[in-house]
Image: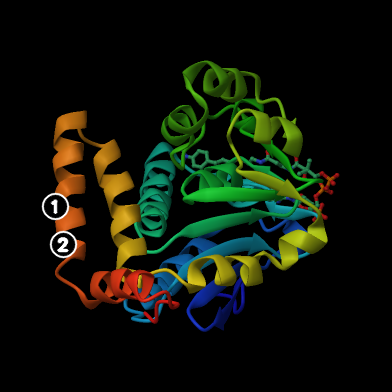
Amino acid sequence: MSDNVIEKNDNDGIVTLTFNRPKALNALNSDVLKALAAHLSELEGQANLRAVLLTGAGEKAFVAGADITEMRDKTPEQARAFAAQALSTIKRLERLPVPVVALVNGFCLGGGCELALACDWAVASDNAIFGQPEVLLGVIPGFGGTQRLPRRVGPAMAIDLVTTGRKIDAQEALRIGLVNRVMSQAELSSYAEELTKQLGGNGRQAVRAAKQAVHDGLDQDLDSALALETSLFAFCFAGEEQKEGMSAFVEKRKANF
Ligand code: DAK
């Protein structure tokens, strides 16, 4: 595996993973997927983890898709194995117990868009370009795009994007709910600091429980999901954070989690 295809920066539990193949617009090959899986194994065991940010090296691309050169000669069996490996890695990313945010700094196509969809939310620079152009290559999205895209933007828009393969700009991505915010490249590069401030005063266990409630609840009917929320709400009262957070409010001081 080549070194450094993903760079890691850890700022007190706010971890940024940077896809680092700028000459290939950070396209995802098997080395990158292996490196991502290895980083996830570390992050899953990291006690002080607060958030994970994904971004792309260079100013041109977040991730321009799966590596087409590597995919070209695959047999159906190899394609199935490749997709299965990627799907399980992307699922592990999605289920990290902390917020996972895509910082989309340019082309975000195919497998790159699917990676962003597996993040809890995405923010984009104003030059970002999104799309699921797989049909132009004679295939369909293979990293979850046909399933996560309709869940995020609705089936009509998802079918539009996966059947035409058209590219959309950051403003359209914002309008359809694919990204939460659009900002300049400079603002995007300081987003880690902004997120540090936003999460800084929050209970860590509460943040984890909030994410779990949303993810697990989305897979259930409403009554079961509300019961899950009740369990997690009650669970919060078993820990120190709830006592500290509510005491701090009553005593008119800042909570110290
Ligand atoms: N793979 C490999 N190399 C790529 C790449 C990619 N996806 N995208 C860009 N590159 C490389 C280019 O080949 C070029 O390399 P050199 O020629 O310099 O060696 C370099 O990056 C710079 O790209 P360009 O010269 O093309 O730059 P431009 O600014 O002119 O164009 C572009 C930028 C993003 C519009 C263009 O590069 C482009 O269209 N790239 C391909 C985008 C794309 O089609 N992405 C989707 C890939 S398909 C599945 C599993 C997974 C998937 C599907 C099925 N199963 C197992 C079922 C996922 C599929 C995909 O993601």
Percent position (x, y) of residue 220?
21, 34
Percent position (x, y) of residue 81?
37, 48
Crowd class of label 1 (few under 14; some 14 to 19; many from 20; radius 10 Å): few
Q: Nearer the viewer, residue 120 or 134?
A: 120
Percent position (x, y) of residue 68?
63, 46
**What kind of element bears circle 2?**
helix
Question: Where 59 falls versus 3 (above or below)?
Answer: above
The amino acid marked with disc number 2 is Phe
The answer to whether residue 157 shows anywhere in this view is: yes
| Pointer 1 residue | 231
* Left or right of residue 176, residue 149 in this image: left
| Pointer 2 residue | 235
* Left or right of residue 183, residue 115 in this image: left
Q: Quadrant of the C terminus?
A: bottom left
Quadrant of the rendered structure where residue 62 is?
bottom right
The amino acid marked with disc number 1 is Ser
The residue located at (61%, 71%) in the rendering is 5
Q: Nearer the viewer, residue 146 or 235?
A: 235
